[in-house]
Amino acid sequence: GNVALLVEHPAVITLGVRQKENRLLTDETELSRRGIEVVSIRRGGAATAHNPGQIVCYPIIKLKSIGLGVTDYVHRLEDAGIVLLRHFGLESGTRKGFPGIWVVDRKIASIGVQVQKWVTLHGIAINICNDLSIFEVIVPCGLDGVRMTSLEKETGHREDMRKAKAELGQICIDFFGNKS
C-alpha cells in the first residue's frame, strides 16, 4: 500500500537534478567543519537544506492507485503543507512557476519529487522551527535572493514537532489515501 515517511534530518544540503552548477555559497570543507553534509540526489529541483525542526515528508505512493498524474500530485503535496500550516494559524500559498509553499515572498516549504514506474519518491520539506541559517550557504531551490522562513519565525510560537508530524500524517492519509 501507500505510505508516507515523516522525518527530521541532521544538517544536510541536498542537490537535486536541476542543480546545473555549484550553487553552494560556502566550500564543502567549511560545511563539513560545521557538520553539514552535501549529497547529490535524484529528485527534482536544485539545492535545498534539511535540519532538525523541519518535517520532511516522503510519500511512497502508486499514483495510479489514487488517480493522480505527477503535476496533480505535486499540487496536492503543496495543498497538504498549506493545510498543515493553516492548522497552526499560518496562511500560506503557492506561486505560479515556483514550486513549494510561500508566505507572501518568503519560502516556507520546498518540493522535490521523483517518480519511477508511477511510484513517488522524495517529497516536501516544511520549515517548522528549524535554524534557517543553514539556507545562507546555498541558493535555495536555485532562486537567487529567495528568503526562507519557518512557522516559528512567522508566528513567534514554537510548535511541538511530534504534534506537527502527527497532524501532517493525518493530512497525508486524507489527501493520499487509496481511492478504491
Image: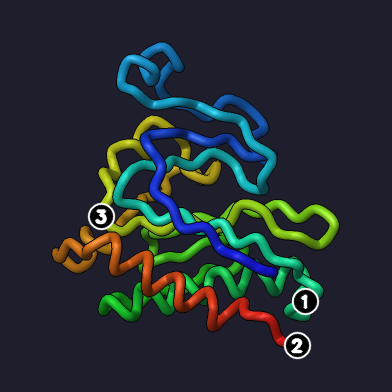
Name which residue type carries label 1: Ser
Name which residue type carries label 3: Cys
What residue sits right under mark 2 in the picture?
180
The front one of 43 and 146 is 43
- Is 143 on the left or on the right of 87, as rendered? right
Q: Is residue 107 visible?
A: no
> Where residue 121 sits: x, y (%)?
67, 53
Q: Earlier in the sequence, mark 3 or mark 1?
A: 1
For label 2, the SS is loop
> Where residue 88 sits: x, y (%)?
27, 76
Measure the alpha-carbon separation of dots 3 and 1: 34 Å
Name which residue type carries label 2: Ser
> Where residue 178 sits: x, y (%)?
68, 81
Picture quadrant where residue 26 is located: top left
Position above or below: 130 against 85:
above
View extreme (right): residue:
117
For label 3, the SS is loop
View extreme (front): residue:
1
Residue drawn at point x = 28 percent, y = 49 percent: 130
Quadrant that contains the C terminus: bottom right
Picture quadrant where residue 92 is located: bottom left
Asked if marks 2 and 1 touch (Cβ < 8 Å), the reply is yes
Which of the numbered marks, if any, corresponds to residue 129?
A: 3
Residue drawn at point x = 37 percent, y = 70 percent: 166
Quadrant that contains the N terminus: bottom right
What residue sits right under mark 1 in the picture?
65
Q: Earlier in the sequence, mark 3 or mark 2?
A: 3
Q: Nearer the viewer, mark 3 or mark 2?
A: 2
Picture quadrant where residue 115 is located: bottom right
Position above or below: 43 against 110:
above
Asked if marks 3 and 2 touch (Cβ < 8 Å), the reply is no
